[in-house]
Image (cartoon, grey):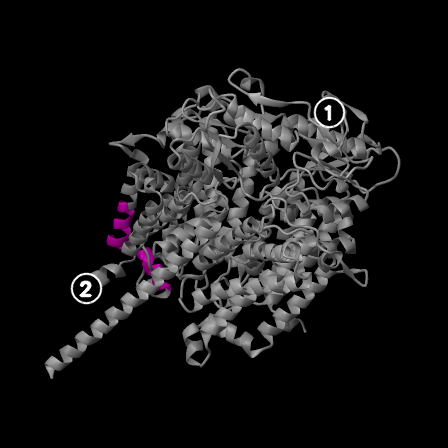
Amino acid sequence: MLKKIPKWNLVLLVTLISEIVIFGLINPRFWNMNVLLNSFNDFIGIAIIAFFVTFVIITGGIDISGGSIIGLTSVVAGISSQVMGLNIWLAVVLAIVVGGLCGLLNGLFIAYAKVQAMVITLGGMLLYSGIALVLVGISGASTYEGISGFSQGFINLANGKLFGILPHSVVLFIVVFIIAYILLHRTRYGRYIYLTGINQNAAEYSGIDTRKIITSTYVLSGLSAGLAGVILTSYLGSARADFGGEYLMPILTAIVLGGTLITGGKGGVVGTALACIIVGFLKLGLQMGGVQTQYIGLAIGLLLIISVAFLGIPNFKSNVSRLLGMKKSRGGNLNA
Amino acid sequence: MRKSKLYKLLTGTILATMLLAACNSEDAGSKTDKGSGEKEASDIEVVFIPKMTGNAFFESGNNGAQAMAEKVGFKVKYDGAPEGTVANQVQIINSAVNSGADAIAISSVSFDGLNQALQKALDAGIKVVTWDSDVDPKYRSAYINQGTPEILGKMLVDMAAGQLENPDDAQQVAWFYSSPTVPDQNSWVEYAEKYIAEKYPKWELVTKQYGEGNEQVSLQVGESILDTYPDIDVIICPDSTALPAMAQAAQNKGLDKDDVIITGFASPNSMRQYIEKGTIENHGLWDVTDQGALAVYIAYHLAQGNDLKVGDSVDVPELGKVTVEPNTIQGYDYEAEDSGIIVLPERIVFTKENTSDYDF
Amino acid sequence: MSKIIGFMKHREFRTVAFLIALFLIVGLVNSDFISIGNIQNSLKNSLLYIVLAVGMSFVLLTGNIDISVGGVVGLSAAVSGMIIRDGGSIILAVIAAIAIGAFIGLINGLGVTKLKISSFIMTLGMNEIVRVIQVIYTDGQWVENLPETFKKISQLSFLGINSLAIIVIAAVIVVHLYLSNSKSGRYFAAIGDNEDGSILIGIPVNKFKVLSFVISSVCASLAGLIFASQIGFISTTAGLGIEMTVIAAAVLGGVSLSGGIGSVIGASIGAIIMTSINSALVFLKVPAFWNAAISGSLLIIIVVTDVLIARRANKKAKTERLNARISNLQEEV
């Protein structure tokens, strides 16, 4: 059974367990199940997007616009329901569709015009958060107060608990994870994504329309950002254009820590899921241990570097000794 | 082989964690006991939350808060994220609840975005005080207010108008602050615009620009404002990054207070040089050190189990007696006995004469 | 005709064309934008980004990426700023800044080459760490009130042109010549173009990779000095997010993210475009809440147009080559 789990995921799992043990020893409140489950609320947005940006990265691309799509879709949901009076659930659908359209725009430019993904999604990042501000400006709602007054039903979307125990965010985390897992690891579509990332030309020759595959991953990533925007709006009870702006680095951190190769072709959502929880718990645990939030970047940076130094290295010890001894090593790094 | 690798990873993680925990061991004292009754001062922990870290204004507030905590003997944990966003603040409030803090003193980035999180904190028996920037009054006991939007908006305009020879004449005026989404600065500007329309109807608002709290962008936008509107008379910058950047931009162009009037809100330490050199005449702020000290003291006072009703007075060490006023002074509809506002006694206009008297 | 196409194929030329187009279009709306004064200002404001983009180009050429430059700008600005504020000499501050840059670059480079950590992750992690170190070092405080003499350095001018700009431009040209004409300079692009091939022909790949990170970090620390001198105060979040702008600038200037292709001149012009957009928005006199939307669409329009032009130029060149070959064949027959 254990053999089926890739090595890296096992390392992540052990890290997660040791985190829970250590933080519990520092502050026993950390072992409170409610505390741990509720903390999912604080990284659910990051996780949802990270699952599907994993797809994008496996194809060899990158999507840094997810965070600003959150702000846009939050505003779309807020304005259409609170200002224009649309039914809230229709507004939710509309918001997610808008997220998908943003992703489509990214994807078309990247797959068909073959522009570098980093630049297009950087432009997209500015553009979508810009549109969010413009929408708020035009709708006459105040840009700084946020749009609130959502129905309790909508607020419960993120704040409620299933059977009174399981926070909806945990349920959502699991559901989205399962969808992503099946899509990526159990379907032909998923295999095509890997093939595209390993060698786009080869994939093309074997009859895969790689441009469609690539575009679709950006659409999925946009849709997931739309969903994250809706969830965040529900969780905070307010729609604002600047939601999600700080999510860029956390999303990428979760994916690369999860073992997905930034150059594409290798990786998976299991690692991303574990990494999201690890980073989320790390933040929570350090805060509960009395560390100020502004110092937590140090721990996340160290975790990232140390853990990845283990990743994909047949023999870490020899690497360290080589580093210390500065022995000459020829040969480049193929997966840098 | 694999086992030893995992073992090493584990050790590495533990070491890193311990290192971090050790850095902050003084804060990490045990506070598991949340028993009833009057508490010892040293058992009370107040979490002092700025909008963001790394901003001179909030760091000064923290200096005041820490000094107060030391004097009285309770604990203050300063906790904020470098990016001032709603999600970050919610996360910090959640972790304050989880780790068993007794009170929160927060400068909110959003009027309504923290409601759910604050409700959870209140349910857990945590006292909530706001300072600098308020939340919905239902979700806090007291707001340590530096001045209502009316007071501050008017102050911004008056600081500029006072320097004009003929304030009633036509003047070109620009606004320059952090972003269109930040609540407090926008609310001051909104009121100030009303005030201008009434009192100085001839003033023309030529532009409103944002520096995103980023020094480089602020300096560049500042220079561009001067280039684009060469006849500009007044630039008002109610933001602690935009104001020094604007002054630096003017200095780079060799302009001084006789060429263009630049004023706004920023800490005196960041502006002293520009005042002394004559680039600007004046700028304002309130004593944020006092504000931070007052905020944590009130939070501590409430966490001790004391009630604070509208109309009550509290004796604060070194700051004297302060009175809780009703929410209506800020224009809120919500009124309750246990929810009120404490307005700082004074706001300061810094000029050449007094700037060296302050250090924050 | 073919000459023009050949010219258009030159990536730097297209970037310059975009820059000129940007100035002309904004100039149509507000003629002040194309005044000598504003062009000088735009150049002065982009110096910081030019220096960063030059350093970044080295790393990008080898097929790696450096996310940590934002953190290095902040830390070196804070450390050297504090030295100068407390009365230390400017030379000491410069040495401190360069030392910081070299040290961080060395760690990045060793992590990437020896520990085989992907450069994206190594420098992303490093960025987080360096930021926290800055907060600890400055005790969370701003570095304020830098002395006039230091701030003046960035404002000095020679023959009416900002002297710092002259130095930076000269340096960019020297670096460009080094990269394009010297043997070791070409190694950087060779590594990014074909790493295994580079190993085979005996290029010390790892050494040059480490070197590229050191150069990038030292450039970032020099940019930190420019930052401190131009702005005069340093917050603890100085340089936050600057890495994305710099990467976009380099790519805008034709540096490929997959390595091997690009020049520092292109990257520098890309940097001027990225910074000029900020000023252009003020000159356009549109309500500022449009700013992000406009700069985002501008960036997308520029890169998409560029790719389309490049493809057309390539196609034309191909047909011409083909035609030439066919006519050659016919002659032979």
In the image, is residue A6 above or below residue C290?
below
Indicate the chain on which mark 2 is placed: C
Judge left or right: residue A243 versus residue A38: left
Q: Nearer the viewer, residue B267 or A52?
A: B267
Find residue B265 and name its label. Answer: none
In the image, is residue B133 above or below residue C304?
above
The picture places residue A39, in percent across and down from the top left corner, at 71, 54
Which residue is situated farthest in the right direction here? B37
The picture places residue B269, in percent across and down from the top left corner, at 54, 25
The residues colored magenta run C173-195
In the image, is residue A299 above or below residue B231?
below
In three-dimensional space, the C-alpha distance between marks 2 and 1, rounded to whole angstroms, equals 81 Å
Q: How many marks?
A: 2
What's the residue type where badge 2 is placed? Met
Is C158 a magenta residue? no
- Same subunit under labels 2 and 1? no
The picture places residue B198, in percent across and down from the top left corner, at 57, 30
Which residue is situated farthest in the top direction here? B353
Q: Which residue is mark 1?
A: B71
Q: Nearer the viewer, residue C224 or B341?
A: B341
Q: Which is more foreground, mark 2 or mark 1?
A: 2
Q: Residue at x 37, y 63 (%)?
A: C195
Q: Which residue is mark 2?
A: C1
The picture places residue B306, in percent across and down from the top left corner, at 84, 32
What's the residue type where badge 1 is placed? Lys
